[in-house]
Amino acid sequence: MDWGVHLPHLGRDVGRDSLTKFVQTAEELGVHSGWTSDHVCWPAEFDSKYPYSSDGSFPAPAGLGWLDPIGTLLFVAGCTNKIRLGFTVLILPYRQPVATAKQLATMDVLSNGRLILGVGVGWMREEAEVLGMPWDNRGKRSDEQLEIFESLFRDETPSYEGEFYSFPEVRFEPKPIQAPVPVWVGGNTRAAFRRTARFGHAFHAAFEPLETVKEEWRQVREECELLERDPEGLTLSLRMFLDPEGTMEPAKSIAGSVDEMVDTIGQTQEIGVSHILVDPVARGGVDGRLDALSSFMVDVASQIT
């Protein structure tokens, strides 16, 4: 099992020192990857429903600090050496693809090949509107962006002519160190499963009961077979709360005693999960979350093969 952790780039006490301490300690503990999530801003009132809560409410409170996901991982690249750098997930429709590709290639080069490109199509229409980005056909637009990334990262003189994006032959250097950059696709729709089969190196589920993840994984594999792609080459990743005090929804959490946590992780392995991204929930701000992560890596993760 590989372990990822959601980095403290959002909260009321975000900053350079706390982020540096957290990620460097995570690296020392043997954590495989550090992850950021993506929001730029959002209206004080909106109607879009958050897909990963039971009532559709967005859990971020008013006044929450939220550092930019790309900028945060570029910073993390400079203060670490081994931990991989992932997005859970980067919302493609919020951004212009060629400029985004340059940022991603820069990150991969400066981190010596540690980027994991987690991608999604988003859920908050109002945020895209604030950013001046179109919300229609966002799935098709995202697929075109992934095609553009492939061309820019691979071809000597890339060009593109699509329904939504186009550009003539260009020079795009340097290329990422990784060839290809691993793409981890998030989402809970059939379109997301098709996107995983077409572009993905992993399916990245988040905050869902294991029976739901099991069914989604079956559909991802089914989509692979329709494309005559071997699904055995895909990784199944799951983002869960690390919740020692049992404050979050149990079906979406690793919680309880050491034995209970080990048992929960065993259940994820039974459905094919080989990477777990833990999102620590603890009192005491960033230090409390880091303490929860440290205890987990020493007492629980060490027991898992």
Image (cartoon, helix red, strand yellow):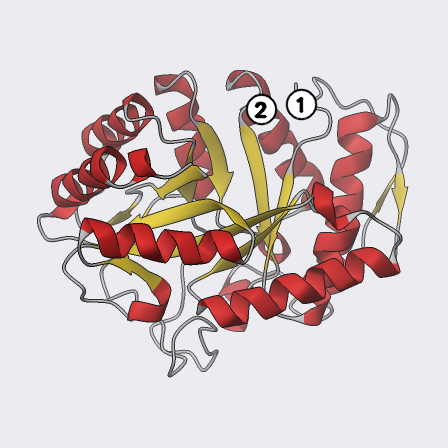
Residue at x 27% of width, y 53% of height: 261
Side of 220 relative to 39 (left or right): right
Marks 2, 1: nearer the viewer: 1
Estimate how packed mark 1 is, as few (under 14), some (14 to 19) or many (20 or more) residues with alpha carbons within 10 Å. Answer: some
Q: How far apart are marks 2 and 1 (CA)?
A: 7 Å
Up/down of 8 relative to 50, above or below: above
Residue at x 87% of width, y 61% of height: 226
Name the spot of residue 292 as percent of width and height, x first: 18, 44
Residue at the disc numbered 2: 108
Q: Quadrant of residue 172?
A: top right
Side of 91 relative to 135 (left or right): left
**Who comes first in sequence, dot 2 or dot 1?**
2
Up/down of 65 relative to 7, above or below: below
Q: Which residue lies furthest to the left in this view?
A: 284
Name the spot of residue 269 as percent of width and height, x first: 48, 51
Up/down of 129 relative to 91, above or below: below
Element assignment for label 1: loop
Name the spot of residue 86 as percent of width and height, x first: 49, 38
Count up the numbered dots: 2
Residue at the disc numbered 1: 178
Q: The residue under label 1 is which amino acid type?
A: Gln
Q: The residue under label 2 is which amino acid type?
A: Asp
User: Which quarter of the rendered picture does the C terminus lie within?
Assistant: top left
Q: Is residue 65 visible?
A: no
- Residue nearest the observer in this picture, 224 or 163: 224
Q: Tags 2 and 1 in contact by the CB under 8 Å rule?
A: yes
Name the spot of residue 182 as percent of width and height, x first: 65, 36
